[in-house]
Image: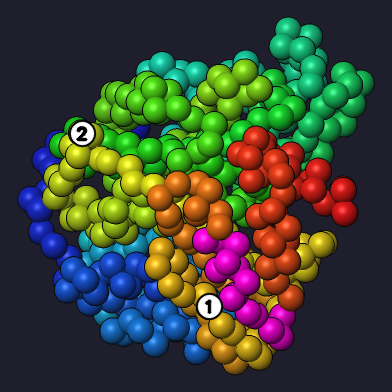
Amino acid sequence: MGKVGAAPAATPTPRMFKKILVANRGEIALRVIRAARELDIATVAVYSTADAESLHVKFADEAVCIGPPAAKQSYLHIPAIISAAEITAADAIHPGYGFLSENAHFAEICAQCGFRFIGPSPQAIRTMGDKIEARRAMAKVGLHSLPGSPEPLTTDAAALSLAKEIGLPLIIKAAAGGGGRGMKIVRNETELPKLLAVARREAGAAFGNDSVYIERYVEHPRHIEFQVAADLYGNVIHLGERECSVQRRYQKLIEESPSPAMTEKKRREVGERIVEALKKLGYSNVGTIELLMDERGELYFMEMNTRIQVEHPVTEMVTRIDLLRLQILLAAGYPLPYRQEDIQFHGHAIECRINAEDPVTFAPSPGQITAYNTPGGAGIRVDSHVTQDATVVPYYDSLLAKLIVHDSDRDQALRRMRSAMKEFVVEGVRTNIPFHHRMLVNPDFVAGRYDTTIVRRMMEES
């Protein structure tokens, strides 16, 4: 395997874009538009008929309807997006997160049609999008994963043999995706063949690839991720870690930076290893290295997300660096404007995702918003695409807003978040705001002694 994100033989002369098409919707589309506006770059919004009245459509310089509500016919429809870029004379395309953001074929099509894809190379996306290939690539540069299968599992016999070697419990994972789809926990060898079959079916249906692998399962893990940035000239930095262990069914609900489980020494050591690994791999643009921390505090590579993350604002708050602006600069061929020693961490930041969903069952809750009030004050930020009288449509994810707070330390940030959450009002649809009220006073969360089981345990106690 060659370098996963190696720059082309002739790196581009830095040249700022004149117009960016935003191939996404919701709050991340607005976030890209704001970053582009500050760089004096014109923007094009694309939208489905369900999003005709959305804020990203209103605030972009131009807007093009690309299809009906179904994502496959609009936000995932590559010909429609490329056509919109052509008719508006855009020179770059920002994919945001989700949808086509980690689609290597889309990145290739953008390049073939003369549009700069604001993200890493297609080769890097393809390699890191395959979890087995990513594990193999990162192991070669010193970032090891939990003990598991080095290749896709093709037979039940091979899986059973590996299970005896690694020991139980195990977790089955889809090679081509995440979000909990295709994941199965195995606690008894006799159930392994059945769960493998189920995992393959789920992986094939969700990702068009039924390859799966297994690895040792950690009962009480913490989910830690490092933000990275790299230019086309071999320069790489990390911007510290985020803790993302408050999850339900592998979907993140609260993130914070720095992690209560990390020390300055460990941050420096792990960060240096990640930077050196990405230099060897030739990665460029922003990305996130996701790690699992076991009960002993050991960290293992899980996967790399080759895009901007939903939770990027907590890193922005503690580093005072605009990651969307940085993405655009790097894609335009500019060198990193920071060295590692320039990155300083200030205080503590927490993000709560406000979703249109039942606070107990987490079932989606579409409908019309009849009242909407967001908190304000020092150290409070709300990233949202929602307004009063807006309609929450059932076709996409349920994220309404991200409430982010920043303060001098974790205790003060928690106090600020609890206060801000009391001012957040959404009526007309159900939201998970009551869930956040409970979590923000949960003794384990307040003490910083929590792992990815905290949501399940809290819900079971109610």
Residue at 18% across, 42% down: 338
Q: Position of residue 257 (x, y in %)?
A: 46, 45
Q: Amino acid at mark 1?
A: Thr
Q: Position of residue 87 (x, y in %)?
A: 28, 80
Q: Is residue 210 above or below residue 56?
A: above
Judge by depth and name the residue closer to the eye, 160 or 233: 233
The residue nearer to you, when weighing 334 against 9, is 334
Q: For residue 457, what is the image quadrant? A: top right
Against 59, residue 315 (above or below) is above
The crowding category of the residue bearing disc 1, from other C-alpha atoms within 10 Å (few below 14, some 14 to 19, many at least 20), is: some
- Residue drawn at the location 45% of the way across and 52% of the way down: 349
Query: Where is mark 1, residue-wise?
Result: 374
Q: In which quadrant is the C terminus drawn?
A: bottom right
Image disc number at residue 307: none
The residue at which mark 2 appears reads as: 341
| Residue 91 seen anywhere in this rendered image of the structure | yes
Name which residue type carries label 2. Answer: Glu
At label 2, counting other C-alpha atoms closer than 10 Å, the crowd grade (few under 14, some 14-19, many 20 or more) is: few
Left or right of 366, for residue 274: left
State the image quarter where residue 388 is shown: bottom right
* Picture layout, residue 393 above or below residue 196: below
Q: CA distance from mark 1 to mark 2?
A: 36 Å
Left or right of residue 214, residue 25 in this image: left
Residue 136, position as x, y percentages in the image: 48, 21
**What is the residue that sits farthest to the top in this orientation?**
165
Q: Please report the residue visible at 72 percent of the width from the left and 49 percent of the height from the top.
A: 442
Q: Position of residue 206 (x, y in %)?
A: 67, 50
Tally the numbered discs: 2
Label 1: element kind: loop
Residue drawn at x 82%, y 27% as measured from the top left: 186
Q: What is the span of residues highlighted in magenta in the rendered image?
A: 416-429
Q: Earlier in the sequence, mark 1 or mark 2?
A: 2
